[in-house]
Amino acid sequence: VEAVPGASAVLAALAVAGIPCDAFTFAGFLPRQGRERATALASIRHATHATVLYESPRRVAETLVDLRDHVGAERRVALCRELTKLHEEVRRGTAAELAASITGDVLGEVTLVVGGRGEVTEDPATGEKAAEIAKWAVDHGLGARDASELVRLATGLAKSKAYALCLELQGKAPAKAGD
């Protein structure tokens, strides 16, 4: 998916982020430090919908670490850089994954989209696609851990659901409560 030039980076980022955005909050630039920053991060931590932030390329690594530490390491984040320009880049992952992958300054305009907390209602097509990818991975000899990671990255399915699906396909489904 590519963003087309439009009125703002907010809408372009939401379009390419791969994060559910039926509702979102635009937070602008986070305060640089202190109580105001902590309050803004707490607000993002409790949000049940996507939050869009602008960030300075010089501070994006620090912000990703703060998101990991204060919002949640497993929270989904999309780092959108130079949208609608020649060197457009979108990195998607958890706050922990992106914090680990960014070292030093990032070039260009940066927009971050942070997913909301809690379970996301899945599109039935996502479940079908996840099952198809999981079956292929298991049939080709991948273990449940590696297969579930492939499913998670390809579909956005929750890690626990992807792992349970792969275990089930291997005939090692975990016992349900009460069995």
Image: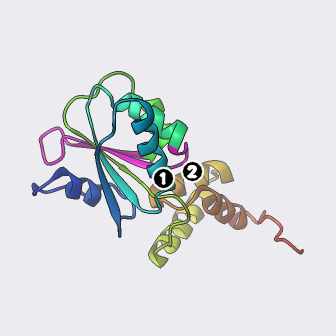
Question: In front: 131, or 12?
Answer: 12
Q: What count of labels does the image hold?
A: 2
Find residue 110 and report its horizontal and vertical position in percent.
Answer: 25, 39
- Residue at image point 48% right, 69% down: 129
Q: Is residue 171 visible?
A: yes
Within-10-Å neighbours for mark 1: few <14, some 14–19, many 20+: some
Instruction: Determine whether, in the image, residue 104 is placed left or right of residue 54.
Output: right
In which image quadrant can residue 59 be found? top left
Q: Is residue 75 rendered magenta in the image? A: yes
Q: Which image quarter is the C terminus in?
A: bottom right
Find residue 76 and report its horizontal and vertical position in percent.
Answer: 46, 51
- Residue at image point 55% right, 47% down: 74
Q: Secondary structure at mark 2?
A: helix
Check residue 153 in the rendering and tell me which mark sits there, or answer none.
1
Task: Give the residue pinned by disc 2.
Answer: 149
Q: Secondary structure at mark 1?
A: helix
Tag 2: amino acid: Glu
Q: Residue furthest front?
A: 35
- Residue at image point 39% right, 23% down: 103
In which image quadrant can residue 99 be found? top left
Query: Is the Cβ of the residue at disc 1 closer than 8 Å to that at disc 2?
Result: yes
Tag 1: amino acid: Leu
Q: Residue furthest bottom?
A: 124
- Residue at image point 84% right, 71% down: 177
In the rendered image, the vertical position of residue 167 relative to residue 30, given as above or below: below
* Residues shaded magenta: 71-92
Question: In front: 46, or 137?
Answer: 46
Find residue 144 and report its horizontal and vertical position in percent.
Answer: 67, 54
